[in-house]
Image (cartoon, helix red, strand yellow):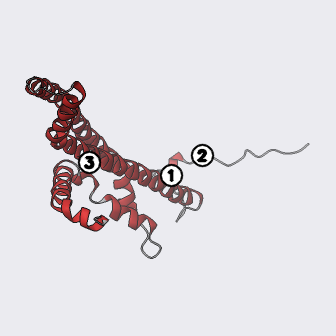
Amino acid sequence: MSTISETFDQYREDAEAIHEFCEDLYSKNFSVYFDGVRDLYTRLKSKTHPISNEELAYILTDLPLELFSAAENLNKLRLDHEVVKLKNKETLEKTRRTLMEEVTQVEQSKSSRQEIVSRALNEKMVEYEILLSAYNSVITRVENEQSFARELIMGAKKIWDSRRGAESSDPVGPVVPEDESELPDYRLPKQYIK
């Protein structure tokens, strides 16, 4: 009986190739949108170096636009995924018909012919299934990154609002209008009590 590590070693090369494919797909289409998000999160949580207003402004204004662009790329990836799924079904049916024709020429019971066809289909379709799994993996990763970025935006908004509220309730200096004529006339007319 083989151990789990022996089994893993058997498939290590294939697994590494799939990881490399997924990482390459992610890097080409999505990393530009999410590379700095973790760093901004670290800055947001820092106790020693509070996040700057410029960084908060970036999170609140630019990051949502980048999320929109990432969503467009994600939709393209989902479309590719669906195309592969549909082609997978088409290939599966063609292969099944071809195998059934080949197997019917051999004199065997119907159940053994179906078993032979089923086994052959599984062997031929494994590459398509692996590709579908890779697409699913990248799609899930991007969805998780989008959720993380949205939470970062919400946290940044709270800090931004808190800072703005503190500034408005406790201004740094006196508020003096640029034009003195804008000041209302607070002198009351002299009234005498009779």
Query: In which quadrant is the N terminus drawn?
Result: bottom left
Circle 2 SS class: loop
The disc, 3 or 1, on the residue closer to the chain's N-terminal end is 3
Q: What's the residue at 72%, 46% (across, down)?
A: 188
Around disc 2, counting alpha carbons within 10 Å, would you say few (fewer than 14), some (14 to 19), or many (20 or more)? few
Numbered mark located on residue 184 in the image: 2
Numbered mark located on residue 155 in the image: none
Measured from the top left, where is residue 49 in percent x and y? Answer: 42, 73
Q: Which residue is mark 1?
A: 180
Q: What's the residue at 25%, 63% (across, down)?
A: 8
Amino acid on which the number 1 mark rests in the picture: Glu
Circle 1 SS class: helix
Q: Nearer the viewer, residue 139 or 89?
A: 89
Query: In which quadrant is the C terminus drawn?
Result: top right
Q: What's the residue at 47%, 73% (across, down)?
A: 47
Q: Which residue is mark 3?
A: 138
The disc, 2 or 3, on the residue closer to the chain's N-terminal end is 3
Q: Residue furthest right?
A: 194
